Amino acid sequence: MTLRTLLLTGGGLAALAVSVAFAVTIGPADISTADVWASVASHLGGGESTLAPLRDGIVWDLRMPRTLLAAVCGAGLALCGAVMQSLLRNPLADPFVLGVSSGASTGAVAVVVLGVGGGAVSLSAGAFVGALLSFGLVMLLSHSLGASMDRVVLSGVAAMQLFSALTSFTVLTSADAETTKGVLFWLLGSLSGADWGQVLLCAGALAAVLVVCLGHATTLDAFAFGEEAAAGLGVNVARARLILLCATALLTAVLVSCAGAIGFVGLVLPHVTRALTGSGHVRLLPVTALTGAVFLVWVDTLARTVVDPQEVPVGVVTSLIGVPAFVIVLHRGRRKT
Amino acid sequence: MSTPAPDTGLHADRVARRTDGRLIVDGVTLVLRPGETVGLLGPNGSGKSTLLRLLAGVLPASAGVVTLDGHPLPEVGRRATARRIATVEQHTHTQTELTVREVVALGRIPHRRAWSPASAADARAVTEALERAGLTDRAAQSWHTLSGGERQRAQIARALAQEPRELLLDEPTNHLDIQHQLDLLDLIADLPVTTVIALHDLNLAAMYCDRLLVLNTGRTVAEGTPTDVLTPALIKDVYGVDAEVGHDPGHPVIRFLRRGSGAP
């Protein structure tokens, strides 16, 4: 690691820590930074909390897991987006391009609306299974079509259409108004149901996939001029592609099953980060994970406070911020070619 | 001239490649002598590009074998192969924002291990490759700002950063004007590596290559020095055009004749 990488990573970590500590204090109940420290210290250190149980509960059981889940989801989505864009050589690729989110929505709807599993299966479990089924379908389809990267993207588009249609059909024909609203809220991406179990699950998946991706950082560099050029540089293209597609799909599936399909983080943040770090993946991947984390912490804070006491799905807010950024990316892309 | 034992250097032994039931390359044998420049000729679709991919080990052979120092390429492994053999493609494009130096540094990937940063040897190889290709003052520039000829030179510099002993080039002079074609071929001919280069221009092949291999429908139809190979009969046979062949000091010169102009 060079000095610049260390500076960027260290700065990003510091920004993330400050963001989390500050975001937890924001909300209807008046919580100070001192309260946050007191609560965290008592839970991690095991000492007596000086805080009233209600305030302690707000910090430790509600805001802390939610803020951390926002950080982990932001990091994971930005990381997967960066890997997908390099691997598919497509600046418009995002973590959902292989149909993972659409499959997840169908799985979630099957559980919530159709009652698949008879109440024993949670929405998250349904979404996770749906996501993996969709990804599996995309891989099978693209493999039968010859497994070039274009085919992978086209298969993803096909799967996305199919599962979106299934989801819409199920919701429109079977759900009552209240369930529809609940499902829609989840589909747009929301961190309102965050708990510590989800935080640990997502953080574990993020850590594992981050290690895999960093191990393939120079391999991803080699894809800059296409798969044949990568092969000429000694990359086992089929193996690298399979490992990276599976790792990112798995992480995306875990994140989506916990927090729904939060759009635009995975599309836009890698582009913003490239402007800071350049295109080398050793630097890009850790830094984009950090910018994604900081970004989603703040956007979720906005989402849960801006139309207080109502809550806006965080996916709506990321899109509202993401669309203008997306237009800027398109403009820059047009100038280049 | 003595043929070296096939256990040194790059050697294709009756290689074939079948795609969708069609033989693209059909039993080609090629032994490379250290340091020579071999020109690969033949009409469009004759199998030149496919043969180069087989030699680079990027495509597996359907039959026959390509060996490096006597070992079949699949046994040598992709990374080890890429440390010996470098390829320059006909046309390259990227959406990624890279400086010229970063493009050239891609050539160090086969020499690097995961998790380890670029070494001083990596930096030195990149600097030398840039210098050799005459791109030192362009190193910090974006690859997207380069002209077609400079992009090809950058790719050659990237290939040199791989520190290969064998260099394979697929029509690297396509789309370049004549000055840049000659510049590029001068650069390539002076490289201290064994080179196989697919070319369309017979005169350039005659000027710059020590030896020629002519392919037609995937088979070798002629092999030897430019003087031996480039005859009116062969050109008529392979390309279907009439030509006169004269001789400049050291190499033949081909003059194509207009159809129906009363050629001999």
Image: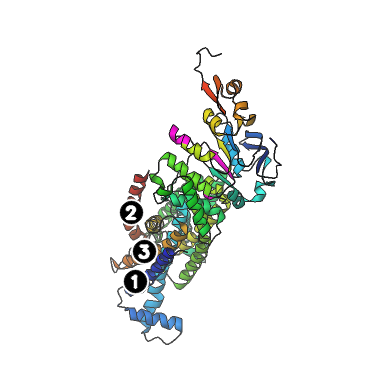
Identify the disc placed on residue B236: none
**Is label 2 in a helix, a strand or a loop?**
helix
Chain bearing mark 3: A
Q: Which image quarter is the C terminus of chain A in?
A: top left
Q: Amino acid at mark 2?
A: Val
How far, Cα to Cα, is label 2 from label 1? Answer: 24 Å
Q: Amino acid at mark 3?
A: Phe
Q: Which residue is mark 1?
A: A23
Task: Work out whether disc 2 and disc 1 sit on a shared chain.
Answer: yes
- Neighbor class of circle 3 (other Cα within 10 Å; few <14, some 14-19, many 20+) is many
Task: Work out whether disc 3 and disc 1 sit on a shared chain.
Answer: yes
Residue A270, image x, y percentages: 40, 57
Quick check: marks 2 and 1 in contact, CB under 8 Å?
Answer: no
Identify the disc placed on residue A295: 3
Quick check: marks 3 and 2 in contact, CB under 8 Å?
Answer: no
Looking at the rendering, the stretch of residues picked out in magenta corresponds to B161-182
Identify the disc placed on residue A323: 2
Residue A141, image x, y percentages: 54, 47
How far, Cα to Cα, is label 3 from label 1? Answer: 12 Å
